[in-house]
Amino acid sequence: MAKIGKLVREVEIKSDINLVYEIYKHKPNNSAIIAPDKVQACDLVSGQWGAPGSVILWRFIHDGKVESAKEIVEEVDDELHKIVFKVIEGGVLEVYNPLIITINVEDMGHKKLVIWTMEFEKVNANIPDPTPYLDLLCAVVGDMDAYFLNRP
């Protein structure tokens, strides 16, 4: 029997949250420059950056191996600083299908947060949660934060 799950993780950053949001909205391909040990490439397959319905192909390092995942941008909400991606191709779908990934950035005055949410259905109950993928997303945000803080 399949199991539906949800993971949420907050990453506190020191840089401007809008910089992180804009990377994921308009320039996710720059993540390969900022975190090359985690992201090998990010290519626009169809549509345009930052537009719902666009398709993006990611190549990333997971458990020491290169994996790929194709995502469709389901929602972009500039007011809430939220982007929703749905994975539509890739090995990850063999164990988590569907897999929906949401990034939301919030400036709470005293805290600046990048919040990742993964909603998924495991193909069977014995499969662990996709925590390593969430760890990867959070690590990339940490690299982005360091990158933006170290820019002149």
Image (tube, rainbow, N blue to C red):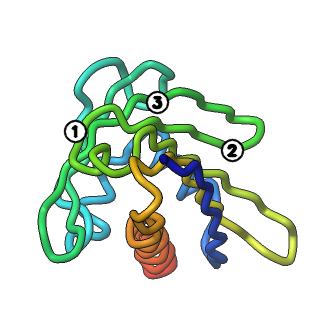
Earlier in the chain: of badge 1 and badge 2, it is 1
Q: Residue furthest right?
A: 109
Which tag is nearer the camera, tag 2 or tag 3? 3
Q: Quick one: label 1 or label 3, which is nearer the N terminus? A: 1
Q: Say whether residue 152 is visible.
A: no
In the picture provided, is 73 more to the left or to the right than 112? left
Mark 1 and mark 2 residues within 8 Å of each other at the beta carbon? no
* Within-10-Å neighbours for mark 3: few <14, some 14–19, many 20+: many
Residue 53 appears left or right of 116 = left
* Residue visible at 31% across and 67% down in the picture: 34
Tell me the residue that label 3 is attached to.
Answer: 73
Q: Amino acid at mark 2?
A: His
Residue indicated by mark 2: 81
Q: Quadrant of residue 132?
A: bottom left
Q: Secondary structure at mark 2?
A: loop
Amino acid tagged 3: Val
**Residue 140 visible, this angle:** yes
Position above or below: 100 against 7: above
* Residue sitting at x 27%, y 20%: 46
Mark 2 → mark 3, Cα distance in angstroms: 14 Å
> At which x and y percent is residue 52?
50, 22
**Mark 1 against mark 3, which lies toward the viewer?**
3
Disc 1 from disc 2: Cα separation:
22 Å
The residue identified by callout 1 is: 43
Could you tell me the amino acid type at mark 1?
Asp
Quadrant of the frame with the C terminus:
bottom left
Q: Earlier in the sequence, mark 2 or mark 3?
A: 3
Name the residue located 66 percent from the left edge and 70 percent from the top edge.
Answer: 10
